[in-house]
Amino acid sequence: MLQMKKDLDQRFREGNPLRIGVVGTGKMGGALLSQLRALPGIRPAVVVNRTPQRALDALMRAGYESDSYKMAEGRKKALAAYEQGKIIVTDDYHLALSLPLEGIVDATGNPSLGAELAVATIDAHMDIVMLNVETDAVVGSILLEKAKKQGVIYTGSAGDEPGAIMELCATVLGNGFRLLAVGKGKNNPLNRYATKAQLAEEAEMKGLRPEMLVGFVDGTNTMIEMTAAGNALGFVPDVPGLYGRRLSVADMPAFYRTKDDGGELNRYGIVDYSFGIAPGVYAIATTDSPDVKEIMRYVSMGKGPNYVFHRPFHLTSLETPTSIYKAIVCKEPTVAPEAGQFCDTVAIAKRAIKKGEAISGIGSDDVYGTIVTHASQQEDKLLPIALITPGTIAATDIRKGEAMTGFHVEHTEPMLIHKLREEQDQSIFTR
């Protein structure tokens, strides 16, 4: 991305940096603000957090001078400060969208808020970078279609595993290989029934919200990430919940072959995850050419017929600047659900839930997520975990370990994300 660096340096010299809004200043959003300090060609002109003090703290930690940012005091004063080159801090993303920005980064990780922010950003004719795979995995297809109609870019972020997978696939497909499978390494041990109390001490040590760490450990985060990757590629889980084997890179060519060919798979065109190679992402590909196979042996890529392309890192929000640049300057997404809805991450009860009880979603003590094909989700009316929002209650008793359906819950406070999903399910953008 040397051209990106040259372009951004030139924009800075000309006093014309990319002016963006960053919504959410938790671990990911805060790290992005710090990384942007090294890239003055991208300016976080507005920083939004529902608790503005956290945005101020994030800017301070990132090294911005205290006189370089200002709390918003209404749109008129905010616009005046913006035009003076101040970074505006606010709890209102609508204020951000009323200012002359070129794009928005959603770093909230909140599915329902992400849906509202994405629609508002698209309607404001701004590009949006979703460092919020939780939203993308459930309503990304309809958001992408809305963005196309408005002539703006809707994209996931580089650095997140789906973005890293797509960058790896660009190399594989762009050089003529046939893509068979993709996956990610899982960092944390898997405990489907992890709770916030169990992980509170570890979360504090790692500087994470307990809900965030629970979502990692119980596997929901992995399922959602691979849902997003599958929807980008038109790939599906080979089995519900994926294989999740402990594999080295050397083990993968034998495992990721169909059963007819001595491997473990029922089909190709799948997503998966593996322990043993985390962090990082991988792609399995092949070729029919004897000459190409000979070169692959020569460059120590193995005997074939299947080969592993492995990227041993992903840098989360530290790579988001790449997606900001690609979206705003190049008008290209890093990763988007171009294929439609091929996968879904659905809710499984972690505990016995009684009728009338409130249910919390991703990262809670109530449910974990597992990936299934979208066809299975539709056929069995399974409940996408991201549709569990504030105000969701049990409409009936639910057994521990039971796959939840739409009939199991009531949404006492219907939200935009529910409407978007209904619209998406009725559209041609799902498979």
Image (cartoon, grey):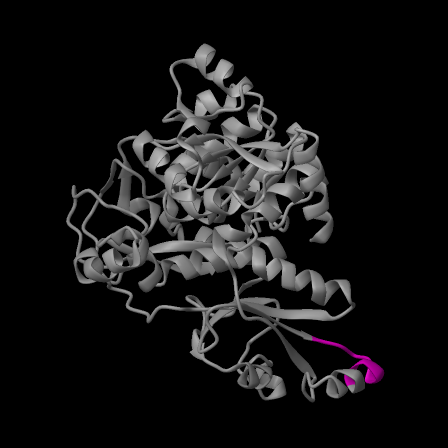
Residue furthest out toward the top = 76
Q: From the top left corner, tell me how far across and down residue 380 is, in percent.
A: 40, 54
328 shown above or below 156: above
Q: From the top left corner, tell me how far across and down residue 213 is, in percent.
A: 30, 57
Q: Over which residues does the magenta segment extend?
A: 286-293
Image quadrant where residue 304 sits: bottom right
214 shown above or below 109: below
Q: From the top left corner, tell me how far across and down residue 343 is, in percent.
A: 50, 56
User: As drawn, is 77 to the left or to the right of 156?
Assistant: left
User: As drawn, is 138 to the left or to the right of 401?
Assistant: right
Question: Is residue 208 magenta-colored?
Answer: no
**Most foreground residue, 397 or 37:** 37
365 shown above or below 180: above
**Most foreground residue, 180 or 22:** 22
Please tell me which residue is depicted at 31% across the width and 40% down the height of the picture.
389
27 shown above or below 235: above
How many numbered marks are there? 0
Residue furthest out toward the right = 291
Q: From the top left corner, tell me how far across and down residue 114 is, in percent.
A: 44, 37
Please tell me which residue is depicted at 58% across the width and 21% down the height of the picture.
100
Please tell me which residue is depicted at 43% across the width and 34% down the height of the picture.
65
Question: Is residue 289 magenta-colored?
Answer: yes
Q: Is residue 169 visible?
A: yes
Q: Is residue 343 visible?
A: no
Please tell me which residue is depicted at 38% across the width and 15% down the height of the picture.
73
Image quadrant where residue 15 sits: top right
**Most foreground residue, 63 or 78:** 63
